[in-house]
Image (spheres, rainbow, N blue to C red):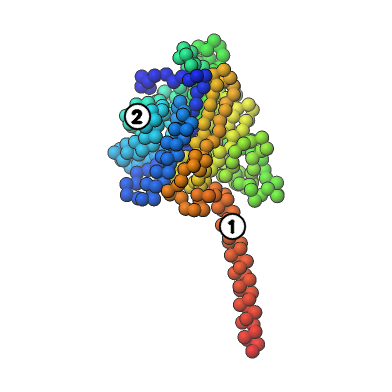
Amino acid sequence: MNNLPPLKFKDGKFKIMLAGDLHESYAKHDPLIQKKTSDATKLLNKAIEELKPDLVIYLGDIGKADAEKEMRSVIGRVTYPVSAHDVPLAIVFGNHDRECELSLERQLELYAEEYDKFYTYDAVPELTGCGNCNLLIKDSNGEKDILNLWFMDSNNLCDNRNLSYYDWVHEDQIEWYKKTAAEIKEKNDGKAMPALWFMHIPVPEEYELLREAKPYELPDSIKGHGTRNKINYVLKDDVEGYLGEGPACSEVNSGVFKAWKETGDVLGAFFGHDHMNDFAGYVDGILLAQNKLAGFRPYTDGCRSGVRLITMDENNLEDVNSKMYYFKGFGLKSESLGPVQRNFSDRQVIKIKAASWIAGGLTAAVAAGKAAKVIKKAVKK
């Protein structure tokens, strides 16, 4: 890690802004792609200006390019909003960040070269993945570490697709987490330090925030991902937010959630990966929160691309306060989306299309029926 100043609470608060799935890539002369980049940049700029975070975290699938020069340009674009506002930045890598000729290790170096307030580092290079690390946050006086932030690489795709499509946090990563948490606990007078966890691919326990849809709920339900795709789900009543797609977690439960419970430090965990989901709820006392994408390049949720703000109170660290803020809610106007997407979310668009198809089918059926009657009369004549 570079010799960066420690992060600390300000006037009793520490605010973290999360942005997921920017999916930036190098496209030099594509006007539509440039508009999509412009929309994402406007969202980040406006959110930073209004929410005034103390730290911004990108939750993976940030950007890719074929060559180092192009990747440097991509990183320059995604770091511009934070550098322009002089806000510290940290990241976790996602599965699509690997679709690049540059190694993740070199990408980390480029982030640090492009922005001098880049806080992610590779704590133990020998561990599975890249960018596994933690950041300790000091109190407002800058005297004592009171909050810990974990950053973990959820890796890429599983080598054995019969086992799982997506990979998971590996055993060596979990062991490093438990060992490091124990060291922090020992320095913290034997008490587990309150912590937050940031990762790209969600844990399977997110499905405990969902329930199987009842027959009358099927129109507003979603199918699960992977082996759960035969079940239609809705959010449980005590879960806030929006469910737009089945959580695309690994089919293998590697035991990360179990490790959190055993260690007793993680208060909340935050994920990207699922572009349309932004639900949040508690499982065994731990907050699990999805973050809708902040980008506009991949499949989106209309003008509901957004960011999540976490506000931690120095005097009540057990309370994890978080809220989603959306592109349209900031009063921004999209350059890249059409009129339908600017006004509706993806699932609403799907329903509108389905309704139009049904209406179109009925119209065609009525027209065909009328035509048949005309033909029948002509034949009789």
How many neighbours does mark 1 have within 10 angstroms: few (below 14), some (14-19), or many (20 or more)?
Answer: few
Residue 96 to residue 357: above or below: above
Q: Position of residue 304 (x, y in %)?
A: 52, 43
Q: Residue 136: tell me if it is visible.
A: no
Residue 371 to residue 321: above or below: below
- The image quadrant that residue 234 belongs to is top right
- The image quadrant that residue 286 belongs to is top right
Q: How many marks?
A: 2
SS at mark 2 in the image: loop
Q: Residue at x 64, y 28 (%)?
A: 284
Q: Position of residue 6 (x, y in %)?
A: 42, 18
Residue 368 to residue 161: above or below: below
Q: Position of residue 268 (x, y in %)?
A: 56, 27
Q: Residue at x 61, y 73 (%)?
A: 368
Q: What label does residue 115 carry, if any? A: 2
Q: Residue furthest front?
A: 331
Q: Measure the C-alpha gap from mark 2 to mark 1.
A: 46 Å
Which amino acid does the dot numbered 1 rest on? Ala
How many neighbours does mark 2 have within 10 angstroms: few (below 14), some (14-19), or many (20 or more)?
Answer: some
Q: Residue 304: tell me if it is visible.
A: yes
The residue pinned by badge 1 equals 354
Closer to the chain start, of discs 2 and 1, is: 2
Q: Residue furthest bottom?
A: 381
Q: Residue at x 63, y 86 (%)?
A: 379
Q: Position of residue 35 (x, y in %)?
A: 39, 47
Q: Residue at x 32, y 49 (%)?
A: 29
SS at mark 1 in the image: helix
